[in-house]
Every structure is written in structure tokens, then in C-alpha cells.
Amino acid sequence: MGEAVIDKKELKGTKLGDQVDAIIFHDINQVLRASVSFPFHIGKIYSLKAKDVDKKGVYFEINDRQNIFMPFAERTYKVLVDMTYPVAFKEDRYGYVYLTSKIRDLLTNDHPYGENDEVSGRIYSINKSIGAFIAVDNKYDSLLRINELRGVHTEGELINARVKEVKDDGKIELSLRQRAYLQMDSDSDRILDYLYENDGRVNLSDKSSPDKIYRIFNMSKSAFKRAIGRLYKNNDIAIYNDRIELKEGKNERRY
């Protein structure tokens, strides 16, 4: 492999001729480096920032002075500079350490989470027919199904979600939506905010088309009807055939 450069700070307490165990890797300048105090573990997943991409592969930042290499053969999606991704350290038979985005087999279903727990993790794979696969806590495998996704998502994106279901085998399914009663409160508040900011009126009702409701409030018609039902029950709004209006005396925001 040739000679490797090691930071002299790591050699404190050693002398010329001493044998040391070291991790070997290439940095962003393709310099072969060695480290006797490598802070990462082989076969474990970490969230690291991409610093550069060239024709050979991708370089990820491991501290403020060093970067480590991911060969293109270990890359499973397009990597963007300055984006953070869940990646794992691998070691070849010569002791050379490199990165991979092939992390699925390193994730486990043995987790502490239950239904409705809040979790966070990074997307490590997107299947347009199934959904986004997420590495929760860089340890646990989970799925955000395609019908739960809203907008454009990319690998590496940090997702905060709710555990929708834990399968018998421990597999986690996620949702970006809150629990039903919390979501209803959130939807009701969104409608009230719109009314406060638009002279107490919106030209929608429970008879409006789903498309028109979604364009204005980014919610389904069924969620809209539940939300305005709650507002009506609380005597906050009046519902007409072609509009909704704030009730008299309800034009002050509630905090």
C-alpha cells in the first residue's frame, strides 16, 4: 500500500521503531493516511457530510482536518456536496478503510420504539413504488410509504416522523402525520389563521372540491371537514353554501 502519513499528535509517547496498530485510509487529496485513534467503528453507521466528488468517488468529512473516501462502487445514489448522509465504514483485507452507502444489512429491527413514538432518521433509499427507507438513529430500519410522502424527498434528508405501526417482525412503518386528534387541532388552527389573515372569510365550504381545498390549505377534504366541524362546534365559525366566516367577536387570535 505504500507509506502512510500520520498526525504527529497521535504519536505522543512513542518512539522511532515502535509498532502501532493503525487504521489506513485515503483523504481528499488521495494521500494515504494512518490513524491510531480513529473515532469510528467498522460496520457501524454514521451521519457524515459530503465534501467533494471527483471521477473516482466521494469524500466525506470525518473531522475538521480529515476526509475519507467512498468509491463510486459503494455509492447507491447521487451524492451532493455539503449534504449529510448515513454511511458506514468498511475495511478490506489489507486494512484499508473506506465508506459505503450500502447500509441496509447493517440496520436492525431490534428497537425500543412503539406505536406513536416520535423518531428521526435519514433517508438511505427511495423506491418510487414503495416509499422512502429511513435509518432511524443510524441503527434501525424503517419505511415511510409512498402514500405518506408529500413533496420532493432525497436520500440523506433528515426526517422527523411518528411510528405508525410496528410489525410482528419489528419492522417500523412511519407517518409524517400526527395522531388524528392532534392533526385535527393543527388543521383547525391552520384554518383559523387563514381566516384571521383574510378578513374572517374563505370561499370554501364542506361542498367545495378536494382540489380547491388542497390548493388553499394543503389538506384533504375529509381532514378539512373534520377541522371545520370542530370549529363550528366550538362556535368559532359559520358555514354557508359557498364560504366560511368567523363568528362575530371571534376576530381576535387565540394564544
Image (cartoon, rainbow, N blue to C red):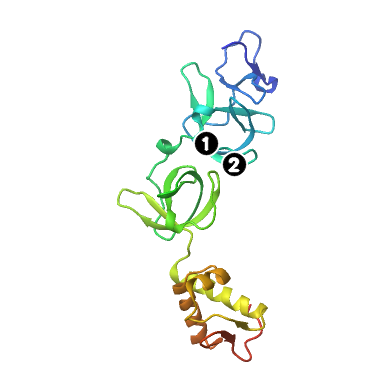
Q: Are discs 1 and 2 less than 8 Å apart at CB?
A: no
Mark yes or no: residue 105 visible.
yes
- Which residue has dot 1 on it? 87
Q: Quadrant of the C terminus?
A: bottom right
Q: Residue at x 44, y 73 (%)?
A: 222
Which of these two is toward me, 96 or 191? Answer: 191
Mark yes or no: residue 13 visible.
no
Which of these two is toward me, 16 or 72? Answer: 72
Residue type, mark 2 in image: Thr
Characterize the local packing of mark 2: few (<14), some (14-19) or many (20 or more) Cα atoms within 10 angstroms. Answer: many
**In the rendered view, does 113 fall on the left or right side of 214?**
left
- Which residue has dot 2 on it? 84
Q: Residue furthest bottom?
A: 248
Decide: is 92 above or below 223: above
Q: Quadrant of the N terminus?
A: top right
**In the rendered view, does 26 fall on the left or right side of 148?**
right
Q: Residue at x 56, y 84 (%)?
A: 244
Instruction: Kindly state the secondary structure of the residue where label 1 is placed.
Output: strand
Decide: is 205 above or below 151: below
Which label sits on residue 76? none
Q: Residue at x 37, y 57 (%)?
A: 165
Q: Where's residue 238, x and y in %? A: 54, 88
Q: Where's residue 183, x and y in %? A: 49, 69
Which of these two is toward me, 77 or 166? Answer: 77
Q: Residue 20: name its quadrant.
A: top right
Instruction: Kindly state the secondary structure of the residue where label 2 is placed.
Output: strand
Residue type, mark 1 in image: Val
